[in-house]
Amino acid sequence: MTNLTSLLVANRGEIAVRIFRTARALGLATVAVHSDPDADALHVRDADAAVRLPGAAPADTYLRGDLIIAAALSAGADAVHPGYGFLSENAGFARAVEDAGLAWIGPPPEAIEAMASKTRAKELVRAAGVPLLDPVDPATATAADLPLLLKAAAGGGGRGMRVVRDLDALKEELEAASAEARSAFGDGEVFAEPYVERGRHVEVQVLADAHGTVWALGTRDCSLQRRHQKVIEEAPAPGLPDALRESLHQAATAAARAVSYRGAGTVEFLVTADGRPYFLEMNTRLQVEHPVTEAVFGLDLVALQLRVAEGAALPPAPPEPSGHAVEARLYAEDPARDWRPQTGVLRTLAVPGRVRVDTGFADGDTVGIHYDPMLAKVIAHAPTRAEAVRALARALAEARIHGLTTNRELLVRSLRHPEFAAARLDTGFYDRHLAALTEDTPDTARALAALAAALADAAPAPDAPLAARLGGWRNVPSQPQTRSYRSGETTYEIRYHPARSGPPVPVDQPGVRVLATGPALVTLEVDGIRRMFHVKHESNSPEVHVDSALGAHTLTRLPRFADPQDRTAPGSLLAPMPGTVVRVAEGLAPGSPVTAGQPLLWLEAMKMEHRIVSPASGTLTALHAATGRQVEFGALLAVVQEETPA
């Protein structure tokens, strides 16, 4: 038996925070590593000690095994947990950790190597009688082999994956997949296999010790995916026949035994619409979705990983499962705009209800451009699937998430979709339903949110002096108060009559009656239905967040009297996203003639360059951008005065 005392987590974000939580409960000291953008991240603040990895890109920081091992030794750690992603499935790193005299919280390097070899892994499960998807050589692929799925050999999580439906695009997609895999895992190897349309992604969690015991901890369904990354996962996988479930358990156990596996791992399968399973791969690490298995079996998989690493033996059989668990991944992204990642300050993250929340962020933290945009995982566990799904949907619907656009509404609508409720699951769910699931909120809901924001904005605090509480009252009833708010491209002008006693009276809002107002809560009666609106005004910011059963809305408070200097002149070019100006067209200066469509400057955001072009032919009258300058969303970059037609 080994007695561990201090644990370094070679990762970041929510998985590092989650591992630290268990480590503290077991009495272990904790050590974090961090890149420069993560210097004040939650996982750094949460650890007993932290070591800087200079730089920002993963290749310079979280993929530098030598720096991580040096950090563990300098901080006095005696064990390294890799989390998931980055170096978690890198046999060379695992071996280097052990060679440095540190305990590796994961499977033996030889097991990682065996399962990293896709051909070797398939040989192992073939012996268990599970059908396989035979690999396809991209060099000899024909139209008959389409569609193809390109996959990174060194990792998972959807990184380095592409679906190819056109042979002419194969070469370009191979290069793109390889580049993404190299950036994410430090290894650009990519392989191809047939892509199965409308299949289910089903996996088996395994846990093994060094004494010959292997547990198969049930199944998980992870079919709802975007860009080959999982969005909603659940355990057990619903609707599987007992015979199929048992064969998957046997195949997963056989694979683990064949490589003398130790620790936690996951064997993944693709199940076709007619119920035929195909082995995909074995992930030799902890999975993002491990909390649903923990909930159903009443286990702490990280604690078991640590005990197995110390040499402890597992009981002969795992606990009996109980109930159903569902997990949703909350991302800072806009699903309606090609899943565009969002950056900025997370003002508020509060999820009510009896749910588990695993997150790497706290209120006031900044979501940057360098890493995955996942904010949190929210997990619900209940006696039945229907109860777990309802509990998760309600918790997400009632959550307060301010400061960033997220996929929260998509998650709620997905969980309440008839296909999901009926457990008709497959990987094409979002291909079929994304447009309907991302339909914009009805304008009436936004208008009510703007009314609530205006009434809350005007309401004095309960302990304000009498003069302040009467300050909004006028003795000229024909002149209502007016406040304006913007949501997207729409401006809402809210008008209401203040009252000497009682609540204000809205103007031009038929069917709406104000029942109560306060700085943080407004109660309205809408067409006879009482509705409560929670309002939060950001200090030193025009942003107002309004949450209700009708949805969550972020509004921008507009000044009552516009400052001429704040007006946006015709021809203004605004930054479409936060980023850095990396180049300005040569010789461009105020007074320069420009033509419609001419590139004026280049903005870099989320590792991509975006051209800012002239909207018309004319004269550049202002240039506020300079190379190297960071700009916020909506910042004024330049102004073009369109030439007047003769």
Image (spheres, rainbow, N blue to C red):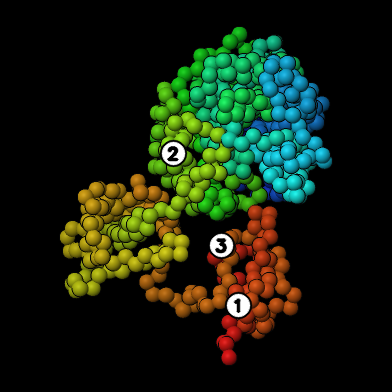
The residue singled out by tag 2 in the image is 417
Question: Is residue 415 visible to us here?
Answer: yes
Q: Quadrant of the N terminus?
A: top right
Q: Residue at x 61, y 51 (%)?
A: 368
Asked which secondary structure carries label 2, the reply is loop
Q: Nearer the viewer, residue 364 or 627?
A: 627
The residue singled out by tag 1 in the image is 616
> Which numbered mark, 3 or 2, is in the foreground of this view?
2
Q: Residue at x 28, y 48 (%)?
A: 531
The correct choice, above or below, for 390 with respect to 568 in the image is above
x and y percentages locating residue 29 in the rendered image: 63, 29
The residue singled out by tag 3 in the image is 633
Q: Nearer the viewer, residue 112 or 126?
A: 126
Q: Nearer the N terminus, badge 3 or badge 1?
A: 1
Q: Nearer the N terminus, badge 2 or badge 1?
A: 2
Question: Which residue in the rendered view is the most extreme toward the bottom?
Answer: 646
The correct choice, above or below, for 414 with respect to 56 in the image is above
x and y percentages locating residue 388 in the rendered image: 43, 29
C-alpha separation, residue under disc 3 versus residue under disc 2: 33 Å
